[in-house]
Amino acid sequence: LAKTTQPISMDSYEGQEVNITCSHNNIATNDYITWYQQFPSQGPRFIIQGYKTKVTNEVASLFIPADRKSSTLSLPRVSLSDTAVYYCLVGGPLEVFGPGTRLSVLP
Amino acid sequence: KAGVTQTPRYLIKTRGQQVTLSCSPISGHRSVSWYQQTPGQGLQFLFEYFSETQRNKGNFPGRFSGRQFSNSRSEMNVSTLELGDSALYLCASRKERYEQYFGPGTRLTVT
């Protein structure tokens, strides 16, 4: 199972773009990369999923380099409500959730 | 489209008792997974059910069990509750590939 490494915490200000990078050196050929967002006392919420290059949806972009050993979640123009924990998962749903990245958006 | 629902939302039990939690997946989703979340251990995978069969199991004692019904609804049971079982229990369903949709969770407190 591919293990992931993310920063434990990040601070940002409202209106800024936030990039959270996840390392997954042992990613398998058929593994997808999935990001979730979690607010306190709520279940994680699916944000975005990708396999290679770039994926964009209405809330975020996911950048995956050619070697797929890392990925970067990009949140454009964050607001206070984006303060949450962000998890990067590689592989299937059985992949272990790591501690995630605690993003704090300041006014 | 209705999301994943879990009942009850909050529960208080006493050590030694047993508890049953319920999860209704999103319509059309056949896979249901259960997770335990605590401040100290984070999100930990309990088990996954697909078409009424347990497909995968995490590293939890046998006191934790589950089942899935023909309509994909799932239940999780914890017997002989311990103080350390106090946690947020999350259920997630999925239809294909790996994206999961989580319910709001059941907050279990064991006293």
Image (tube, coloured by chain):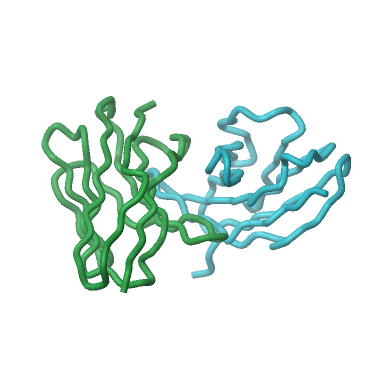
Chain colours: A green, B cyan
Image spot of residue A90 (x, y percent): 34, 37
Q: Residue at x 15, y 50 (%)?
A: A54
How many numbered tags mark residues here? 0
- Quadrant in the picture for the N terminus of chain A: top left
Residue B99 shown left or right of residue A24 in the figure:
right
Image spot of residue B3 (x, y percent): 53, 65
Image spot of residue A19 (x, y percent): 22, 54
Residue A3 shown left or right of residue B40 in the figure:
left
The residue closer to the viewer here, B35 or B12, is: B12
Residue A106 shown left or right of residue A98 in the figure:
left
- Quadrant in the picture for the C terminus of chain A: bottom left
Image spot of residue A36 (x, y percent): 39, 52
The residue closer to the viewer here, B69 or B87, is: B87
Would you place residue A46 above or below residue B51 in this image?
below
Would you place residue B73 above or below residue B58 in this image?
below
Q: Residue at x 40, y 49 (%)?
A: B99
The residue closer to the viewer here, A96 or B25, is: A96
Q: Residue at x 84, y 37 (%)?
A: B80
Q: Residue at x 63, y 58 (%)?
A: B24
